Image: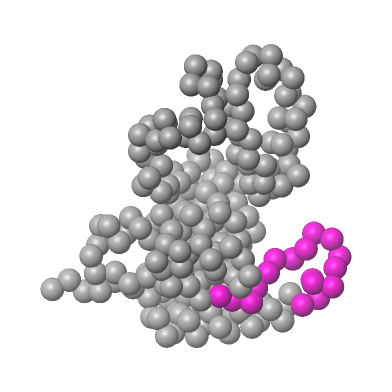
């Protein structure tokens, strides 16, 4: 009889961290029948809603990042961090996972740190070509680091890196089957080329500004545009 494998996942704050974690869990569940999952996120962030919608249990930590400008919120950061470390330690102890996977975001720091303290194997999944501070720090104790781009040995130990690409939801692999539905939904002309613009996190501002600056040129080319603006 196969032994139950317990997997703890932590990542959130933005869809760029949440959906890779959910995709990983979905694929592991598909491959291995005897698995139990638990997610750890940050309270009041979107993972606390999105993860349960996918059928997974999640526990929230009272953690947030440092603000770039001097604000009163930064004075509360050390207390939130200590509280989150204590709670993460208890979560790791109670769930007793076989492996802990971090996809980035505020909650992954305390969670993977406490897993490393208990010598539980940890894995980092880095979606970006330039990793954040949390993953850089966690990389020192991680067993493996899965990346989407070349050149990340500048930031991570080369012997730990595995180039896997980014996890995606299974329904995205069958996108061609939804073309007619999408054309109808967005009111598109199927005879024109369509430009889809997506941007999130730190790169969103530059993407939006570049598109706005070049809008006249794009319209002259007779493209139709779907523009999802995340941050301006």
- Residue 7 shown left or right of residue 67 in the figure: left
Q: Residue at x 48, y 21 (%)?
A: 190
- Say if the magenta span includes residue 64: yes
Quarter placement of the C terminus: top right
Q: Residue at x 63, y 35 (%)?
A: 227
In this picture, which residue range is highlighted in magenta?
60-76
- Residue 172 shown left or right of residue 193 in the figure: left
- Say if the magenta span includes residue 21: no
Pick the front one: 181 or 102: 181
Q: Residue at x 64, y 59 (%)?
A: 133
Residue 155 locus on image (x, y percent):
58, 50
The answer to whether residue 129 is visible is: yes
Pick the front one: 137 or 65: 65
Residue 63 locus on image (x, y percent):
65, 73
Q: Quadrant of residue 223?
A: top right
Q: Residue at x 39, y 56 (%)?
A: 24
The answer to whether residue 144 is visible is: no
Residue 87 locus on image (x, y percent):
56, 83
Pick the front one: 29 or 4: 29
- Residue 79 shown left or right of residue 141 in the figure: right
- Residue 1 shown left or right of residue 52 in the figure: left
Quarter placement of the N terminus: bottom left
Pick the front one: 54 or 4: 54
Residue 208 locus on image (x, y percent):
71, 36
Q: Is residue 101 above or below residue 76?
A: above
Q: How many marks?
A: 0
């Amino acid at each position: 009889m196969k032994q139950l494998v317990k997997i703890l996942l932590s990542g959130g704050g933005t869809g760029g961290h949440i959906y890779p974690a959910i995709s990983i869990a979905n694929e592991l569940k598909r491959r291995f029948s005897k698995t139990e999952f638990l997610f750890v996120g940050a309270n009041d962030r979107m993972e606390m809603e999105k993860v349960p919608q996918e059928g997974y249990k999640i526990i929230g930590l009272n953690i947030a990042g440092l603000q770039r400008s001097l604000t009163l919120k930064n004075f509360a950061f050390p207390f939130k961090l200590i509280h989150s470390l204590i709670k993460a330690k208890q979560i790791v102890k109670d769930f007793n996972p076989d492996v802990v996977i971090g996809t980035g975001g505020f909650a992954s720091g305390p969670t993977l740190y406490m897993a490393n303290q208990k010598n539980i194997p940890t894995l980092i999944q880095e979606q970006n070509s330039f990793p954040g501070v949390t993953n850089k720090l966690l990389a020192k104790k991680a067993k493996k680091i899965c990346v989407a781009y070349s050149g990340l040995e500048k930031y991570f130990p080369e012997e730990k890196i595995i180039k896997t690409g980014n996890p995606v939801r299974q329904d995205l692999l069958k996108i061609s089957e939804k073309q007619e539905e999408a054309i109808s939904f967005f009111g598109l002309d199927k005879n024109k080329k369509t430009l889809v613009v997506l941007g999130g996190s730190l790169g969103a501002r530059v993407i939006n500004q570049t598109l706005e600056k070049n809008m006249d040129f794009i319209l002259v080319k007779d493209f139709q545009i779907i523009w999802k603006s995340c941050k301006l």
